[in-house]
Image: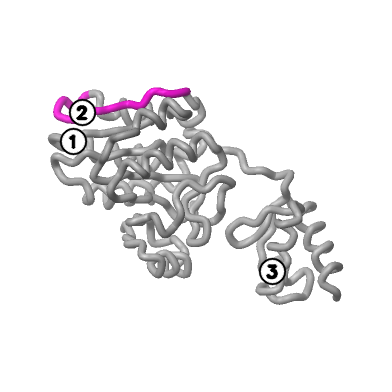
């Protein structure tokens, strides 16, 4: 089979399936996974498909940002374990940045009774979690409300973090990979996440195993800019190995 013919078949399979794995594509066209990966890069450059971790999806199937309510019950036990492990990185008296998300919200719950913390956040839910914590100072950014995730975004939110310097920033996201780093479907969410990452001397990413299944459209933090990754035992070992090769300190929550 000629390359052009194979790529047309691959493009048709991705379009008809919406999303399909590299393994399935290789079986369908009778080629190696290495060849299929090369074909997918060419097809993506031509604007015919969009690659994602482990496969490809139709350009018509652009990912929608899941709402907080939709994400809350996904991998909840893993998120709780990740939050407990992440809390061990916080020392009394620290100034930390906490981004929006269900896993970062779980971290906020773990920190509610800590003394003498300064919290900077764009998340209404994270700020609310500390409302009854008299010894914790909370700084909430301004900006435009993104109701689906109960968080402030936009240039005003990003400007609120300008000039601030925290001990560490805790972020989650919609996708994580060694090639694309942390990512999200929304440009404004990516913008505020980048600003929060820049405000911390150390960037800690909290990501359960489901985040490794896909890359989202907009990169937030490149993988080599992540200092610490806290994940769970179901995270793919090959990806964790690649993250460690990039200098990321990987911790497995149990």
User: Quick one: SS at disc 3?
Assistant: helix
The image position of residue 32, as x and y in percent, is: 70, 76
Query: SS class of the residue under badge 2?
Result: strand
Provide residue 127's location: percent of width, then percent of height: 31, 28
Q: Horizontal and vertical percent for residue 126?
A: 33, 31
- Mark 3 = which residue? 38
Q: Which residue is mark 1?
A: 117
Which of disc 1 and disc 2 is earlier in sequence? 1
Specify how the rendered protein is coloured.
Answer: one colour
In the image, what residue occupies the spot 28% across and 27% down? 139
Figure disc tally: 3
- Residue at 56 percent across and 48 percent down: it is 216
- Judge from the rendering whether residue 62 lies leftward or rightward of residue 140; answer left or right: right
Please state, as top left, top right, bottom left or bottom right, where the C terminus lies in the image: bottom left
Q: What separation in Å lies between label 2 and label 1 (alpha carbons)?
A: 6 Å
Q: Considering the image in quadrants, where does the N terminus appear?
A: bottom right
- The part of the chain drawn in magenta is 132-144
- Distance from the alpha carbon under mark 1 to that under mark 3: 49 Å
Is 51 in front, or is 191?
A: 191
Q: Are marks 2 and 1 in contact (CB under 8 Å)?
A: yes
Disc 1, SS: strand
């Amino acid at each position: 089979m000629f390359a052009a013919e194979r790529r047309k078949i691959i493009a048709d399979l991705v379009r008809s399936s919406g999303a399909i794995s590299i393994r399935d594509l290789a079986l369908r066209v009778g080629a190696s996974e290495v060849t299929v990966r090369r074909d997918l890069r060419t097809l993506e450059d031509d604007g015919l498909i969009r690659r994602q971790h482990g496969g490809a999806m139709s350009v018509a199937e652009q990912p929608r940002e899941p709402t907080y309510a939709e994400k809350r019950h996904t991998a909840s036990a893993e998120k709780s374990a990740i939050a407990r492990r992440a809390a061990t990185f916080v020392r009394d008296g620290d100034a930390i940045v906490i981004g929006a998300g269900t896993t970062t919200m779980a971290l906020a719950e773990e920190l509610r009774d800590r003394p003498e913390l300064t919290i900077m956040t764009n998340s209404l839910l994270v700020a609310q979690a500390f409302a009854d914590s008299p010894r914790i100072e909370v700084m909430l950014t301004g900006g435009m409300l993104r109701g689906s995730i109960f968080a402030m975004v936009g240039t005003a939110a990003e400007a609120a973090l300008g000039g601030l310097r925290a001990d560490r920033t805790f972020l989650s996201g919609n996708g994580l990979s060694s090639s694309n780093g942390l990512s999200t479907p929304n440009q404004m969410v990516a913008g505020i996440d980048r600003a929060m990452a820049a405000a911390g001397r150390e960037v800690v990413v909290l990501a359960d195993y489901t985040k490794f299944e896909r890359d989202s459209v907009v990169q937030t933090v490149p993988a080599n800019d992540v200092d610490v990754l806290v994940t769970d035992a179901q995270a793919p070992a090959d990806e964790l190995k690649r993250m460690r090769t990039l200098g990321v300190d990987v911790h497995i929550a149990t």
